[in-house]
Image: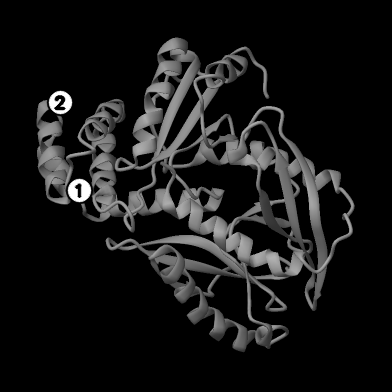
């Protein structure tokens, strides 16, 4: 089952553009640069086609931004939807993700009034639609002109906060809670570079010579993550040293009560021995239906002792600053990429939302052979 968070975010996207898009019926120009970018930024699926069904430019004192809706068509109905994006022309970024239209009385408001409004509006939006608490911080460094006034959104998990990007168009038209991608870079290559340098990835299968790298964002309490893991493990076993696998803990505590604690324990296990992390994950997957919040700690301790790891070292890490910082860093890393559901996978920078045994094995085979989709 897909995460409820995914459905809620997609709903916010639809609200953000539906009213504006209805105003025009003429087919807009098909911008080849936007279409190419989106075909590589959105989750891969065979034989997908992309078209623009809405593209309007809005002027601000700092430059223009474009609100664009891209329609996708494929053989899988799950992917056949419209995606709203905002292209900040002077800032050179394309925002993918939630974009909500603001009330008309905020249009062209001065910056202080706009900030005051956003402080309260975003907090209410998150609580109403996602059942999470957040606060806005405007202390963000920016370089050069931009049609988007950026902020950091500090989201409370119940164990502390993680940071995700946000912004509001200078004219007060849209609030953006998605991921800002550099528009002058290929999104696949951009993500691949981030994965190479990120400290948020636990590389539980790593040979040092692999040409194919799978990065997984998942949640130990997520049924779909458990269901898809055997497929991922199958390709790892098939290809051996040719394929690396990295895991990024992405707990959703608002809907999965024990997910954050298990992610914290998993971080501590990996800090001692990354190769043990996959077994730890499989243990929690196997106990998913019977696991409770109170059982996470003793289960993690039993695993550590049973696998010859340091129990005292786990206690110094588990639900303490090292692991809290680690898991919150993983959450922030995921949001910076636009991850909104678990599981989400990346294969050499290509995003995969719903891997299927009918094609995923062949998909990996092509990468191992040095090809791309």
Front-most of 1 and 313? 1
Label 2 packing within 10 angstroms: few (<14), some (14-19), many (20+)? few
User: Which residue appears at 26% of the width and 39% of the height?
Assistant: 266
Does 135 sit left or right of 219 as displayed?
right
Say which mark, if any, is on residue 24: none
Is residue 145 in view from this perspective? no
Position of the C terminus, as image quadrant, is top right
**Residue 70 higher or lower than 241, as above or below:** below
Q: Position of residue 257 (x, y in %)?
A: 25, 53
Q: To which quarter of the image does residue 147 belong?
A: bottom right
Position of the N terminus, as image quadrant, is top left
Callout 2 secondary element: loop
Front-most of 200 and 76? 76
Q: To which quarter of the image does residue 278 belong?
A: top left
Q: Position of residue 294 (x, y in %)?
A: 12, 50
Instruction: Assess whether mark 2 and mark 1 are in contact (beta carbons under 8 angstroms).
Output: no
Q: Which residue is mark 2?
A: 307
Label 1, label 2: how far apart the Cα atoms are? 17 Å
Front-most of 231 and 137? 231
Q: Which residue is mark 1?
A: 318
Is residue 167 in view from this perspective? yes
Does 225 sit left or right of 312 as displayed?
right
Label 1 packing within 10 angstroms: few (<14), some (14-19), many (20+)? many
User: Which residue appears at 64% of the width and 81% of the height?
Assistant: 103
Does 270 sit left or right of 25 as displayed?
left
**Residue 238 higher or lower than 175, as above or below:** above
Q: Position of residue 362 (x, y in %)?
A: 58, 15
Count the numbered circles shown: 2
The numbered mark, 1 or 2, whose residue comes first in the sequence reads: 2
Callout 1 secondary element: loop
């Amino acid at each position: 089952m897909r995460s409820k968070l995914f459905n809620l975010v997609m709903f916010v996207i639809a609200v953000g553009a539906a009213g504006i898009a209805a105003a025009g019926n003429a087919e807009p120009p098909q911008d080849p640069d936007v279409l190419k970018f989106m075909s590589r930024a959105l989750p891969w699926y065979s034989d997908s086609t992309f078209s623009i069904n809405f593209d309007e430019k809005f002027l601000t004192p700092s430059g223009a931004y474009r609100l664009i809706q891209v329609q996708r068509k494929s053989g899988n109905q799950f992917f056949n939807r419209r995606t709203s994006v905002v292209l900040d022309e002077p800032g050179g970024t394309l925002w993918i993700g939630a974009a909500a239209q603001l009330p008309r009385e905020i249009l062209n408001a001065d910056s202080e009034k706009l900030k005051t409004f956003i402080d309260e509006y975003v907090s209410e939006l998150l609580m109403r639609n996602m059942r999470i608490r957040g606060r806005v911080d405007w202390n963000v460094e920016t370089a050069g002109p931009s049609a988007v006034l950026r902020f950091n959104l500090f989201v409370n998990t119940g164990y502390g906060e993680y940071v995700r990007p946000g912004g509001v168009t200078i004219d007060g038209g849209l609030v953006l809670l998605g991921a800002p991608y550099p528009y002058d870079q290929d999104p696949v290559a951009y993500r691949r570079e981030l994965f190479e340098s990120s400290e948020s990835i636990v590389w539980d299968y790593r040979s040092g010579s692999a040409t194919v790298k799978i990065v997984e964002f998942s949640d130990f309490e997520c049924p779909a993550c458990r269901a898809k893991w055997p497929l991922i493990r199958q390709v790892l076993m098939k290809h051996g040293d040719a394929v690396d696998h990295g895991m990024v803990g992405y707990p959703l505590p608002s809907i999965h009560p024990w997910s954050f604690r298990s992610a914290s324990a998993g971080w501590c296990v990996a800090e001692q021995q990354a190769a043990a992390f996959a077994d730890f994950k499989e243990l929690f997957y196997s106990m998913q239906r019977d696991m409770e919040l109170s059982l996470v700690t003793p289960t993690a301790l039993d695993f550590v002792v049973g696998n010859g790891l340091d129990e005292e070292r786990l206690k110094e890490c588990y639900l303490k600053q090292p692991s809290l910082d680690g898991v919150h860093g993983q959450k922030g890393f995921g949001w910076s990429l636009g991850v909104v559901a678990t599981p989400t996978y990346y294969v050499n920078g290509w995003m995969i939302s719903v891997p299927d045994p009918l094609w995923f094995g062949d998909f990996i085979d092509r990468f191992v052979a040095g090809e791309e989709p």
